[in-house]
């Protein structure tokens, strides 16, 4: 059977596009957060989410506007969680988010809105509150669902920049890095 060249190209292109589509990602950050000269920046939605267990000592959960690592074009929220093995063994225990080094919190979360606020690169915003997972799949492409509730602070001064900050996330587990480009579905 011979396939016409144009038909072959369409068939190959459809396989390539389906293999490179973004997995399910539903990430919403709401509440109130005054971010430098930009003022109020919430609500915010992320189109890229990833999960990585860097070792038995920690796990990294990353949310970004775009699936690239060009920081100047991305808004990013990054969680680092201590004791990845304990987290996987008991994912539903609430996790304190704050300063891991000085306050003994089990997780830290840093916000950087480089795309939205290009004049505020030096602003250091951390979340403080509670991270709660509903599900963390151990499978390569399983679901990760949960929420965060707390406040945002300037890490250098301790000033509260945002109150009633709430994050909800539901995404397909992926250990891909932000510099791997994916073609959006829409």
Image (tube, rainbow, N blue to C red):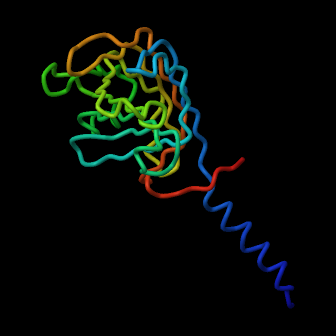
- Whole-percent x, y for residue 79 in the image: 34, 33
Count of numbered circles in the view: 0
Location of the N terminus (image quadrant) = bottom right
Q: Residue at 27% of width from left, 34% of height from top?
A: 86
Q: Residue at 49% of width from left, 36% of height from top?
A: 144
Question: As drawn, which residue projects farthest toward the left?
Answer: 102
Q: Nearer the viewer, residue 146 or 5?
A: 5
Residue 157 is left or right of residue 3, and the answer is left
Name the image quarter holding residue 25: top right
Question: As drawn, which residue projects farthest toward the bottom?
Answer: 1
Q: Nearer the viewer, residue 170 or 101?
A: 101
Residue 10 lies, with reference to residue 98, above or below; the image says below
Q: Residue at 25% of width from left, 40% of height from top?
A: 58
Q: Residue at 66% of width from left, 67% of height from top?
A: 16
- Whole-percent x, y for residue 148 in the image: 42, 20
- Whole-percent x, y for residue 50 in the image: 45, 44
- Whole-percent x, y for residue 115 in the image: 47, 37
Residue 128 lies, with reference to residue 144, above or below; the image says above
Residue 49 is left or right of residue 35, and the answer is right
Q: Nearer the viewer, residue 113 or 21?
A: 113
């Amino acid at each position: 059977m011979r396939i016409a060249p144009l038909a072959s190209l369409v068939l190959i292109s459809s396989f390539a596009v389906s293999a490179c589509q973004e997995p399910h990602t539903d990430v919403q950050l709401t509440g109130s957060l005054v971010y430098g000269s930009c003022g109020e920046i919430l609500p915010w939605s992320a189109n890229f989410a990833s999960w990585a267990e860097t070792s038995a000592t920690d796990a990294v959960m990353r949310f970004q506007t775009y699936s690239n690592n060009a920081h100047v074009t991305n808004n990013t929220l990054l969680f680092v969680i201590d004791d990845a093995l304990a987290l996987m063994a008991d994912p539903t225990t609430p996790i304190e988010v704050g300063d891991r080094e000085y306050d003994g919190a089990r997780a830290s979360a840093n916000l950087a809105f480089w795309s939205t606020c290009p004049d505020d690169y030096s602003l250091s915003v951390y979340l403080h509150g509670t991270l709660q997972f509903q599900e963390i799949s151990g499978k390569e492409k399983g679901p990760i669902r949960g929420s965060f509730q707390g406040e945002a602070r300037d890490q250098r001064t301790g000033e509260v920049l945002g109150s009633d900050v709430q994050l909800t996330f539901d995404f397909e587990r992926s250990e891909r890095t932000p510099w791997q480009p994916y073609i959006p579905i829409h």
